[in-house]
Image (cartoon, coloured by chain):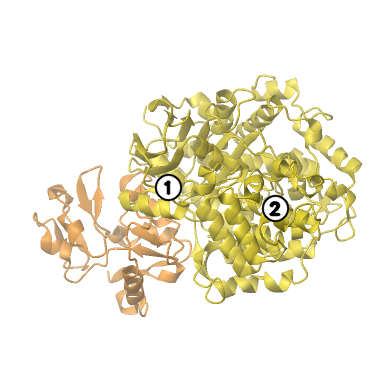
Amino acid sequence: MNKRLQVEIDKCTGCGLCQLACAVKKSQQFDPSLARIKIYRSEAQGFNVPLICQQCANPPCVTVCLMNVADKDPNTGITVRESNHCIGCRACQVACPFEACTYDHINDVVVNCDLCGGHPACVEICPTGALQYCDISTTLAGARDAAAAKRSMIPDRERSRHG
Amino acid sequence: MESTGYAGNILEIDLSTNSQHVTKLSPQFCHDYLGGIGFNARMVYDGVSTGTDPLSKENILVFSAGTMVGSTFPTASRTEVSAKSPMTGLFGTSNSGMFFATQLKNAGFDSLVFKGKAERPVYLHLEDGKAEIKDAAGIWGKDSWETIDIMKKQYPGCEVASIGPAGENLVRFACIENSYFDAWARTGLGAVMGSKNLKAIVVRGTLGIKPYNPGKFIELSWKARKLIESSPFFVPFRSYGSMNAAIPYGNFKALNAHNFSQGCLPDWKENFARSKVDQHTHGHIACQSCIIACAHWVEIKEGKYKGLHMKDMEVTPITAFGSGCGMSLEASVKACEMSQRYGFDMVSASGAVAMAIEIYDRGIIGKDDVGYELAFGDDEAILRLMDDIAHRRGVGEILAEGVLRAARNYEGAESSAMHVKGLEIPMIDPRGRTSTWSFGILTNVRGGDHLRCRNPVENLRYNENKHRFGKERFGFDPKMYDALDMPESLKTRAIDLENDTTDIAVMSYWAENLINLFNSLGVCIRPPVEHRIGPTILAEAYTAFTGLEMDADELMRGAERSWNLMKLFNLREGEKPEDSKFPRRFYEEEVGGRKLDEAQLREVLRRYYQTRGWDADTGVPTADKLVELGLNPV
């Protein structure tokens, strides 16, 4: 499986459907704070940024994990977790530059996007095509750079919505 | 039993005593009043005694999340806020979207009820079931945007409802600002909040909303989405939102141009065209769970108002300031920003300004009264006057009372006060457009307002007045008729396919109930939704979400029940049959060669009352109707 989530940033309207679809699939309830995807809205500058797990080549979350819960799956290359052993210390949350580690307050563990086993609920429900699931080799040209650029434009994190 | 769908609780806060009380929702209450506006109707009816001064501590202020909010049901995002209105003295209520209700429900509550009055300025901090009243000394006096900035810094991830200086100064048409760019604007609820010394409500929650049957509910969310996407109104609304209406209404000469004196301004089409939306906007903004995203990010890149960057270019602010006061498009964005920061209703504020300019033109007030010259289209003078209104300075002190009360201060000014039941009329002039939508201004429980009655199959391609005020042209393919989810017996009365007409009286009855249902469940009333979403799918979704049995008829009855209850509230407060009429100007002065025929309009009103099961002459719900709805007669 060489597909990854991609964001086409200008298409995001910030509706939050992706968060609700994620939360209800993974936790059986509509609670945006449980979603493995976050949305920042900059009211001052006028844009929305979905923040997703980048499935990094050398993930900081894996590096800092005290319990060796997080690791790269050698077959798929995605970051996976043995949540049974997670102690909920949230060090990975601090380390992740994309805020893609989500604290699951029901089970007191940290989780990240597992691409729903190849059928991501967030992509399915996204009404504008801002979220896409595509092959690494056909990654949207510049999409990641554009997302990173927008992310870096949020000067004041508190002046935005995130769940 | 764990609550499903609903958060399950009502939080009551007495600001006088700083005490709290939590009530569990009962299945019967949910069944009868559904949520949102239904809950509010019951609580305000029961909680506010007759003759209460709306700005006294005896008034109550209720926030209720629409029942389906926080879920994947498309457009479910809305919160209804209600109280006795300081504008009309009748049922005051307003609806707004964005993310407030999502957080409110996740914090564990469907409704917040504020009673009494705090001794000094306070705000409410609500998080995961815990509510705390806090000192607002640090934010009192700040505008809404500044208030939200401070609150968001202190409580990351929260949603904020706040009042600005207008609410603090008890400007009668003050709004409650919903985050930065949206508002519970109409009927002066911000003044009620200000009268309670309540500056802001800060909410965040992570308790989760559990659907009763997640699989079925998500399936129904998808079904609803496909229905909405299949409406011919979907693509236009996704592209231009409510701005689609700006030009047609200008062509009909049905705009509020210069205080309802002209129907349309000469350069309207050039100055406010959809191409202007393209020129000034980048990207769309959605409320919670919306698949349409009708709103735009606006940036003014040049000229005097360069640097404005916000959500705007919707038909209400554009017509309020652009058409009503004759402002330029760019200045209307500034006026919109000012309304949001100061926190007042753009429709009423622009109505007050437009009246002031008109009576200035008529020589009733002069430069000595105002302090500067006033004229339609004088952007700077208008912005200055709005500033004076927000701070109750000079003539602003009088205009801050709304047009009905302000006009009483000047002999001869009453004919320039464009209101119904004390509430300023928004963009539509019924002389130019005889439709379900313009008729609804007369029958709206909240007074002169256009958002509680709209034909789900309104056709903007036609504007024939041969039917005068009884009928409007249907003008669509019969497929549009088939797609309407409406009981067949009523549908054949509302739409006559053979003669290609819609009956305004009958359609108004249906449209008001349908919109009231949407405002109960938290679904948006944008045309693609109103066209394709009806009680059948909503009843199924309601049951899958809450676990409470509900069918389409019973759901509509719930919406009709709360509409009747709001009417009963108004009657109890002394509303008279003769109050349901347009300003004299609409009957006496022509716009675009047309004026209203009072006798004819009364006849449509009679048929509307009959369709509602109300007395045809007085508009009072009959005992039979109230028994049918399970309500007690007055």
Q: Which residue is mark 2?
A: B369
Farthest front residue?
B368
* Chain ID, mark 2: B
Chain-order first, disc 1 or disc 2:
1
Residue A154 appears in which quarter of the rendering?
bottom left
Look at the picture and state if B118 lies above or below A114. Answer: above
Q: Badge 1: how crowded within 10 Å, few (<14), some, or many (20+)?
A: many
Q: On the rendered structure, is B164 left or right of B137?
A: right
Circle 2 — which element?
helix
Q: Amino acid at mark 2?
A: Asp
Q: Residue at x 87, y 52 (%)?
A: B499
Of residues A151 and A113, the one drawn nearer to the viewer in this rendering: A151
Image location (x, y in percent) of residue B256: 74, 57
Chain A colour in the picture: orange
Amino acid marked by disc 1: Val
> Exactly how many numbered labels are in the figure?
2
From the image, state whether disc 1 or disc 2 is nearer to you: 2
Q: What chain is colored yellow?
A: B
* Tag shown at residue B160: 1
Residue B97 seen from this side: yes
Q: Position of residue B333 (x, y in %)?
A: 58, 64
Residue B512 on image: x %, y %: 68, 41
Q: CA distance from mark 1 to mark 2?
A: 38 Å
Residue B164 in picture, x, y percent from top left: 49, 48
**Which residue appears at 86% of the width and 42% of the height?**
B601
